[in-house]
Amino acid sequence: MRSYRLVLLFVLLPLLGSAQFKNLLNHLAEIDSTYLVSYRNDVTARFYFVSEEINFGVHPPSGDHMLIYKPNNDLKIGFDVFHKWWRIGLAVNNPFAGNDREEKGSSSIIDIRLNAYGNALALDLSIQDQSGFFLKNMEEIYPGWNLGDEFPPWNPGDEYPQRSDMHIFSLGAIVYYIHNYKKHSFKGAFIHNERQLKSSGSFIVSPSFVYLKMSSNYTLIPLFYTDAYNIPEDEQLQSGKFLTFGISAGYSYTYVLNKSFYVSLSFIPGVFLQSYKYETYAQTIKGSNPTFLWTGRSAIGYNGTKFYLGLGGIWGFKNTRLDIGQSNFNYDMNQIRLWIGTRFNVPRKR
């Protein structure tokens, strides 16, 4: 293995240093100045609020009320700095918001995100490790539930059933290739070290993958639910590993008013292959099947010469559908972000 890596290194290093490779990078950095203005050499800083909606849902065969598990996480506040190719930032839970631990339990969440935004290519990498969930909509699907004695043994006084044993790890990456990158900018809509002056759109091609590992001490489907919907034992998910990968193709468009106000929308559906290995009460099941996923991005805001503000989000990325028998399970991670920021010049050394 080490010899293989050394051979690969010696092959790639001359390529990365070659004039042809540098010319390719320079070509991909070219933009149409009548459509885009680059602030790559400035420092771009912003303060933001971010809300993430993370759900693990169970849909019964009949399509009636679904079980929705989610971690107990608050609105976060953060600060980012961008300069040239690098970004540094920190986000923490909002100290002014309570997260109702008595009613919803405690959750442990590690959330790491890496982003690289070029002109033609953009990369989003996300790593999440979460433990401790609560059942969000129990009263809706089973009124008066806390007066009974159901399995698992939830406390009768709890407002929400809690699953401290439930753990989910997910790793996802998506690459965007922006065909019309000289006139259309992801950076201008989402990180603002670029500014779009005129309306434009572009076809987008996005290879991506999602790896999901989940575990619990007992089935995620409570007894009353299996009885109500006649869910067999071989569909009562307890733990599993799921790898979903494929390619998407769609379109992104940004409407610009007065060179500063903008609305950006992207919709990128795709076809994927999912391989899985999961455990139920009855057995361990392995296999693979095709699936359909989509990614949506949107933003609205003001991007001026020095200051900018906006509201944006991403939907669908890392949303994973797990078909098990007649039931299906969904892991959803959606994000909404509100930001305000500025740009300033960096003195250059003489």
Image (cartoon, rainbow, N blue to C red):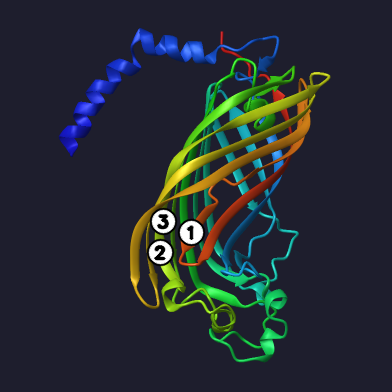
Answer few, some or many: residues within 10 Å of disc 3's Cα (few below 14, many 20 plus, some between 14 and 19): many
Which of the two discs, 3 and 1, labels the residue nearer the N terminus? 3
Q: Nearer the viewer, residue 16 or 206?
A: 206
Marker disc for residue 240: 2
Placement of 331 over or under 190, stated as above or below: below
Contact flag, marks 3 and 1 (Cβ < 8 Å):
yes
Placement of 38 over or under 218, stated as above or below: above
The image position of residue 164, as x and y in percent, is 53, 74
Q: Which residue occupies 46% across, 77% down?
A: 232
Which of the two discs, 1 and 2, labels the residue nearer the N terminus? 2
- Mark 2 lies on a secondary structure that is strand
Q: Which residue lies furthest to the left in this view?
A: 3
Contact flag, marks 2 and 3 (Cβ < 8 Å):
yes
Contact flag, marks 1 and 2 (Cβ < 8 Å):
yes
Marker disc for residue 322: 1
Going by the numbered disc 1, the residue's amino acid type is: Leu
